[in-house]
Image (spheres, grey):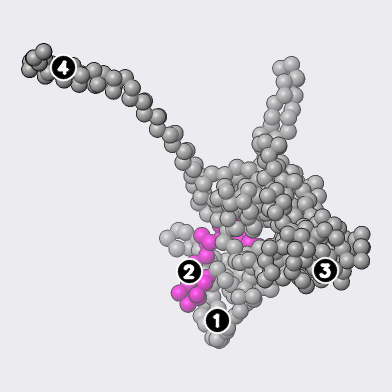
Amino acid sequence: MEKNPLRIPRLLTALAAAAIVVGCAGTPQQPPAPEAQPEPVAAPVPAPLVVKPEAPQRYVVVKGDTLWDISSRFLTDPWRWPELWDSNPQIANPHLIYPGDVLILAYRDGRPIIQIHRGGVISTTAPGIPEQRLSPKVRVEGLDRAIPTIPIDAIRPFLSRPRVVTEKELEAAPYIISTADKHLIAGPGHRVYVRGLADADMTEYVVVRPGDIYRNPDNPREIIGYEAIHLGDVQLKEFSGVSTLQITSSTREILNGDRLLPANDSLPDTSFMPRAPKDKVMGKIIAVPGGVSLIGQYQVVAISLGQREGMEPGHVLAIYQSGEMVRDRLRDNELVKMPDEHAGTLMIFRTFERVSYGLVMKATRTMHVMDMVTNP
């Protein structure tokens, strides 16, 4: 049969139209764009610096001072001392001060500043203070003589130990399987047998045991870390599938099943720079190492904020005492929560993934576990 040339273009046109219809019907819907993650909320802008009415116009630094203590003589918020310190071109780091340094409160363009003077001529714009001459001298100071930011002795045991570990870290840590001579309790001088060592070059370890369980205060079933209680120090003697180590020191009895973590005796940088977190944060005090129930000044606390939430050493947080639940007798004994009350200030000095250690620098009222911490 002879083909009709007029039908071919019509057929192709029909097929193309059908393909377009089928294609439109079968085209999968584009998935919705993923929801944008909420941007971090910026921290509130701090109020202007407030100088105490009784602030001295001149102060001579003495041994035993801390930057926080000195600043508390001048400011209502001593953690803001970096804003007060005036940069002196003759001093490499104006935040390092030493016993004998003279601090003078002055004002520049209406802004309070602290000037640091080391020998030579002291001059200031502060009214009522005459110029005073000191004998010029050259002095070389070591960093170890500089005034610390906070009382280092209060946190020294927490700088290297104890530490916070996760459940996975505990499960993966080497452990003591037995003690030489079958001692039930091991101490200094005893040899212990350990399984799980993976590095023959690592020779120094600390022995730990799980202590407090740190839980998410908003979800108590969620564990955010374990306190690793330091029991002692051990040294590798022979590396193998079951390695031999010797206990060099101990603070408690050491038992089978206790875990080993790499030793870290080097102290981290303790020249903390106090500052508020750049983002809005909110957490709670979740534990007090040592089991103390009441919290006061220079007490170390663990809080439910860590590196994941942007915590860094030097961050300053305000502590709020949780308001009590009170029954409203005029409304059928309805339970009403009272406002949280400002109770103190802490500074973070060591951080972990989801937990941080802080030192309570100021206490205006008694604090407890589960009190709130947030931006100052």
- Amino acid, disc 1: Gly
- Amino acid, disc 2: Ser
Quadrant where the N terminus lies?
Answer: top left
User: Marks 1 and 3: which is nearer the front?
Assistant: 3
Against 52, residue 239 (above or below) is below
The answer to if 82 sits in the magenta stretch is yes
Q: Position of residue 27 (x, y in %)?
A: 33, 25
Q: Which residue is mark 2?
A: 87
Q: Which residue is mark 3?
A: 247
User: Marks 1 and 2: which is nearer the front?
Assistant: 2
| Distance from Cα at disc 1 to Cα at disc 3 | 52 Å
The mark found on residue 119 in the picture is 1
| Distance from Cα at disc 3 to Cα at disc 2 | 50 Å
- Circle 3 packing at 10 Å, graded few (<14), some (14-19), many (20+), is many
- Circle 4 packing at 10 Å, graded few (<14), some (14-19), many (20+), is few
Mark sitting earlier along the chain (4/2) = 4
